[in-house]
Amino acid sequence: MTKTRALIEKLNREKQLEQEEWIFLLKNSDSEDAEFLFSLARKIAKQQFGNRIYTRGLIEFTNYCRNNCFYCGIRRDNRTVCRYRLTKEEILECCQAGYQLGFRTFVLQGGEDPFFTDEKMEEIVGVIRKGFPDCAITLSLGERSYESYRRLYEAGADRYLLRHETADASHYGMLHPPELSAENRKKCLFDLKEIGYQTGTGFMVGAPGQTPECLAEDLQFIRQLNPQMVGIGPFVPHHETPFAREKAGTLEQTLYLLGLLRVMLPSVLLPATTALGTIDKKGREKGILAGANVVMPNLSPVRVRKQYELYDNKICTGEEAAECRQCLSGRMEAIGYELAVDRGDYKEEKKNV
Ligand code: SAM
Ligand code: FES
């Protein structure tokens, strides 16, 4: 057995590795090692979730952002973006349409838009909670205060997605302007967990300046945080950002990391992301076959979809929600899985199945 495979087996037994071991795994793998990892990751995902794929309806409700992250297409300094905000009524219409299609989780995602104060967000979360009592509400609004997170949790939000982006402070500095820090990002994540949210973190694969050492730190940080969800997808350049001419992350590396995450955290909720579907036509299917168990189709009104362009050539910007749901359902069936009509909450690991 190769040393890489021996380390994958060790990860499967012990659910953690030393920094040097992670680095070795990240630097040394061939396609057979990757296949070995994927089949183990698939087996674990099947034990935990059967052949059911959870869906989350993504509502991109504002593309205003006060931040200036170097990688992101909706960064403040991109003056070519036509900015929009959905009204409470429009957000509710998205939920209504999504509910009828079988979505039982709504993800409200947006730039860090100061217009959406705690009061406004409490009201929006409150009406969704009241109108859709059997659904989960996930927020992805970036960095806010402990008090703000607490208020939104009290108002009825269940989950929060906030990728840590990179656990390495100096790499964080290469991706963000100086007013943003890895330290505060991590603090927000621990706050969210403490308050009681099902918490999701994650990072971009192949972000400029990312090394195997950074990725090893990311995996160690994720092990330490022990989140309920992990969102990873390839970095994809956007033409109106400082990273316009950087290379995109690869399919192979993203799949490999999905596999490692599934083995490390057997019951974690792990999406095959839209970015993965953007760099490869079958990216989401391949993500599922590497251990992912969630897809997040778009419920935003078609007229605003192109304006939420975090990176170039983002898929599904012309399709209605129903089309995306049907398309994904067909794609999942073609590889032996089915879309679940279920909140798809985090559950502790099933042992001995
Ligand atoms: N403002 C919220 C936040 O900061 O968490 C939510 C929106 S933010 C745009 C969502 C995620 O998009 C980020 O965490 C980042 O990882 C991802 N993203 C942004 N630009 C990207 C790019 N060029 N390629 C791939 N992913 C990107
Ligand atoms: Fe949107 Fe295929 S998932 S069109």
Image (cartoon, rainbow, N blue to C red):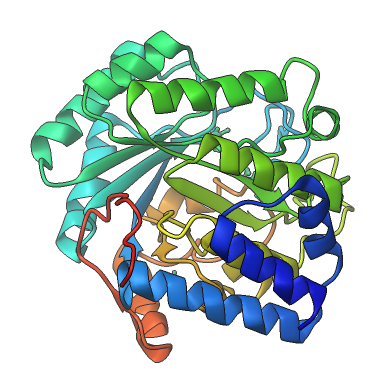
Taking the spot 32% from the left edge, 27% from the top edge, the residue there is 196
What is the number of callouts on the image?
0
Q: Is residue 184 left or right of residue 328?
A: right
Taking the spot 85% from the left edge, 70% from the top edge, the residue there is 28
Residue 3 lies in what quarter of the image? bottom right
In the picture shown, does residue 55 fall above or below 83?
A: below
Q: Is residue 197 left or right of residue 44?
A: left
Where does the image place residue 243, in percent across and percent down from the top left? 84, 45
In the picture shown, does residue 215 fall above or below 144?
A: below
- Residue 59 seen from this side: yes
- Residue 314 seen from this side: no
Where does the image place residue 330, in percent across and percent down from the top left? 36, 84
Taking the spot 16% from the left edge, 29% from the top edge, the residue there is 127
Q: Quadrant of ligand 1?
A: top right
Taking the spot 18% from the left edge, 46% from the top edge, the residue there is 135
In the picture shown, does residue 233 fall above or below 88?
A: below
Q: Is residue 170 left or right of residue 92?
A: right
In the picture shown, does residue 220 fall above or below 10?
A: above
Image quarter hosting the C terminus:
bottom left
Residue 232 lies in what quarter of the image? bottom right
Where does the image place residue 234, in percent across and percent down from the top left? 69, 58
Image quarter hosting the N terminus:
bottom right
Out of 2 and 61, give the one closest to the viewer: 2
Where does the image place residue 259, in percent across and percent down from the top left? 60, 67
- Which residue sits furthest top? 147
